[in-house]
Structure formats: C-alpha cells, structure tokens
Image (cartoon, rainbow, N blue to C red):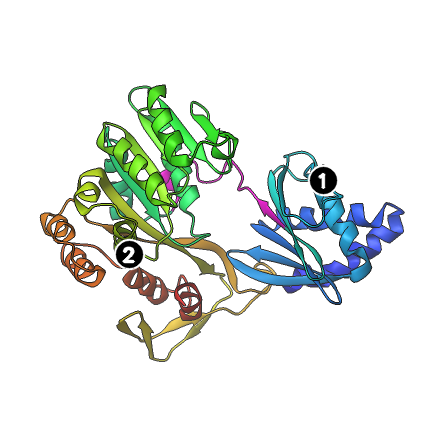
Amino acid sequence: MSGHTNSFDEWTEAAHRTGDDLVVALVERILTEAAKANVSDVHFQPEKNGMEIRFRTDGVLHRIGLIPAERTPQIAARLKVLADLLTYRTNVSQEGRIRAGRLANIAKEMRISTTPTLHGERVVVRFFSEETCYHYPDELGFPPDILAQLQRSIRKNSGAILLTGPAGSGKTTTAYALLRELADRSETLRSIVTLEDPVEHALDGIAQIEITSQGDRTLGETIKYMMRQDPEVLFVGEIRDQQTAESAFQAALTGHLLLTTFHAGGAVEAIGRLCELGIEPFVLRSAISTVLSQRLVRKLCDCAENVAEQLRFVLGQEEYAIKSYKIPKGCSSCGGTGYRGRIPLTEALPLESDDVRRSLLDRNDTSALRDTAVRNGMVPLADRAMSLVVSGETSPLEIRRVFG
C-alpha cells in the first residue's frame, strides 16, 4: 500500500494549509481515501508513539501512517461524534454507525466500534459493502456446480442452507445475494424475514430485524416467536449456540426455508461442530439441504510474474506438484500489493448422496465423513485452491496465507 503511505503526510499538510480543524479534516480524509480504495476496515490503533492507521484491503492489513500521540484522544473523539457515541465515556466499549452521507464524499455506511487500551481508545471502522455489489448468486464468481446446487436449494420450500467459513470469508455477501434472488426472482411472492446483528443493507421486499433490539429475548426465542409472523424464508445471521441451532433447524423441519451462517473451517467440519453443540445427526440429515464452505483469496494483478520451476506444495494432508506458477510483483494499479480483487473458494457437502447421509447417521468422524463426501463428488477447498494457482489466478503464497 505504498501509494497510500506516501500520501499520508500530504493529508496532514493539506489540513494545515486549509486552516480547517486538523483532526476533523484528517479523519475525513482518511475515511475518504479508504472508501475510494474499497477498504473493508480502518484500524485506528493507539501505540506508545502515536495512533497507527491501518487499512484492510482484500482481507490483508496494511500500515498507512502514524498520527502523533497527542492527537490520539481527539481522533477517537471525532470518530465517536460521527457515530453519535458518548465522547466522555472512554473507559467502556461502544458501538455505533456513521450513516451514509454523514461525510460528503462517502456514500457507504460505516460501523464503528471503540474499546479502551493501554495507550488510549482503539477504534475500528468497518465499511458496509455497496448495495450495488453482487446482487445475485450468479454474480459471485462461484463454480457452475456450486451455483447450481445453491439454485436448487433456494427453490425448495423447506430445509436449511448453511453458509460456513471463517470471519471475513464472504458468508454474509452470499446470504444477501441469495435473499435478493428469493425476493426478486421467485415465481411467486414469498414472505421473507431476517434476524441480523447488525442489518448491513436494506433489502426491498424483506422484513429485516436487528436482534440487538429484541430486549431480553434470546436469538433462539426470537426465532420461535418469528414463526408466528408467517415467514416462508428465514435468515438467521449466525448460529452461535445450541439453543439458536435447535430453534433454527426446527424451523427448517417445519416447512420453512432457512438461511444461516456458521463459523467452521470446512463443510464437513461444520457438521462436526454442530454435533458437538448437541444437535442430533438425524436432525441434521433431515433439516439441512446444503452446507457451503467458502474462503476468499486475492486475485493476482496483471503485473504478476511467471515462475517456470516445479513447486511441491503441501496443503492440509495433500501434496501437490506444480510445474509453473505466478508470483505478485506490484504496480501502481494494485497499490504495490500485486493483487486486485478476490475470488471465492468453495466446497459443498453432497447431502443428496445416500452414502453421505448414512455416514452422517452412523456418527462417523469428520475424516471418514470427508472421505465419503469426496468419493461422492465433493471437490475440496484445497483442490479448488490449487487449480487457481495452476491457472495463474492467484499465487502459492496467497493460498498459504489463507489456509495457514
């Protein structure tokens, strides 16, 4: 992100020259530049020597610059003012929103969270993606087999579509695309209700509820209550505990189409974690129609360089041999990173297979269930990842970063 770093001092100097309040101008400039660069998060990180600014672009953090330590409290206070938070409460964590249009040059809405640290308040600003991005599933870049499976699942009147993956893997983007498909392209009008924390975008034709506004009622209890609202499709933002899982899958078993997200390393691992939560295998077999696991990997910029040498690459328990590949170089178009944009990596558990269903009911461990799933057509995340390396769309280093 050298392009951003070089301009950081210029932002400060420009604020001085205009005579505007330095802190007000600097905060607006930082957020404006972040929005222009399609940054997902901005970290205002207090350190001993000042407040470090970091941009997360395509899932990777980059240091942008350092604001003098004496400005740290003022920067945090300005961000809290924009989000209508209490500026005098510096010893507790707070959350809020900076509404779209609050800053003249930023059309995106932002979520802000603050927390006290040793050297002052740490503030993280998350940009909600633009509503015009990725309206429908066929715009997400999924492989044809994955897209076809999702399309089959959302045409059903009941069953659960489980979207899994680590934080920042695009689960919510996929869920919103599926919801838009259901709202805009269904042959008949469908009653769709969402329970989210928070609501990221307003979707036409859909009743969206922020679960933080439900008072003392738990998410599991809220799901049960929403069954009285005559929903046909229910989106639960995330399954986090046994009660939520039980209520959600009960809805899927009683004639409702359920979409939800769940943190797990893969499609098979998601089944294992749900069993650990206490959900019986026969419930999972009957309730779930699709388990999709996804990751996002950065796509190489056109400036990438070819490397014509053999590489042996170990990913998980598999070893791959690659005859040639590409590596990032960096140019002005990609801000010196060597990458532009991201590509989804996906795997879907073939639950329509009798062998996979039998393995699930037999309570086989995740290793045995994975072997059965692969034999019945599941393409693992690792195989899809290496195919992207072979085709030159991403690099071995990026795959290593994403998978660890």
Any part of residue 28 in sight:
no
Q: Residue at x 37, y 45 (%)?
A: 241
Q: Position of 342 compared to 187: left or right?
A: right
The disc, 1 or 2, on the residue closer to the chain's N-terminal end is: 1
Q: Nearer the viewer, mark 1 or mark 2?
A: 1
Residue identifier under label 2 = 269
Residue 328 within the segment the image draws in magenta: no
Looking at the image, can residue 112 be seen?
A: yes
Quarter containing the C terminus: bottom left
Q: Residue at x 57, y 49 (%)?
A: 38
Picture disc at residue 377? none
The type of residue carrying mark 1 is Leu
Q: Position of residue 20 (x, y in %)?
A: 86, 45
Horizontal side of 118 relative to 314 (left or right) equals right
x and y, in percent, of residue 387 in the image? 31, 63
Residue extending furthest front?
216
In the picture, measured across the screen, residue 342 lies left or right of residue 116, that is left
Query: Could you say where residue 285 lies in the image, as x and y percent from the top left?
Result: 18, 43
Residue bounds of the magenta highlight: 124-140
Snapshot quadrant of residue 118 = bottom right
Can you give x and y, in whole percent of width and height, for residue 373 in the image?
A: 18, 55
Q: Which residue is mark 1?
A: 86
Q: Report crowding for label 2: few under 14, some 14 to 19, many 20 or more residues within 10 A (C-alpha).
A: many
Occupied quadrant, residue 172:
top left
Dot 1 falls on a residue whose secondary structure is: loop
* Image quadrant assignment for residue 227: top left
What residue sits 79% from the left and 61% below the top? 68
Question: Type of residue at label 2?
Answer: Glu
Front position in the image: 65 or 78? 78
